[in-house]
């Protein structure tokens, strides 16, 4: 399987955001990365709603 075609900057940002090593970001299938990003966004949205309700 070919590595993802992310720029170094994009891979760094994704690794930081998803708390994964850059090597994993480069070799993880794109659909899995998109799922992880969606989960993270959902979690952040829920936290924002909870903060707003307080």
Image: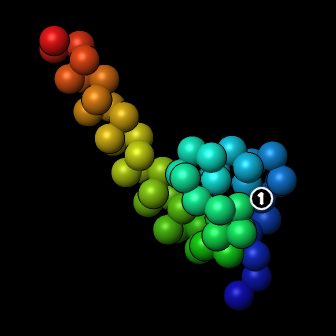
Q: Give the x, y percent position of residue 53.
A: 16, 14
Q: Image quadrant of residue 22?
A: bottom right
Question: Is residue 2 or residue 44 the one in the foreground?
Answer: 44
| Residue at position x 73%, y 49% in the image | 12
Q: Is 19 situated above or below 23?
A: above
Q: Quadrant location of residue 33?
A: bottom right
Name the residue located 57 percent from the left edge and 44 percent from the top edge: 17
Q: Give the mark count.
A: 1
In this picture, residue 33 sits left or right of residue 9: left
- In the shown orientation, is residue 30 left or right of residue 40? right
* Residue 26 figure quarter: bottom right
The crowd level at tag 1 (other Cα within 10 Å; few <14, some 14-19, many 20+) is few
User: Residue 20 versus residue 38: which sits nearer the camera?
Assistant: 20
In the depicted view, which residue is nearer to us: 34 or 46?
A: 46
Residue ID at (64%, 70%): 24
Horizontal and vertical percent position of residue 14: 64, 50
Residue that appears at 83% across and 54% down = 7
**Residue at the farthest left position:** 53
Please name the residue that numbered disc 1 is placed on: 6
- Colour option used: rainbow
Q: Is residue 34 left or right of residue 46?
A: right
State the image coordinates of residue 37 (x, y, percent, origin top left): 48, 51
- Residue lying at the far right of the rendered structure: 8
């Amino acid at each position: 399987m070919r590595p993802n075609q992310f720029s170094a900057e994009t891979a760094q940002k994704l690794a930081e955001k998803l708390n994964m090593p850059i090597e994993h970001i480069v070799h993880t299938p794109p659909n899995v990365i998109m799922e992880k990003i969606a989960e993270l966004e959902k979690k952040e949205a829920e936290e924002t709603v909870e903060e707003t309700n307080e």
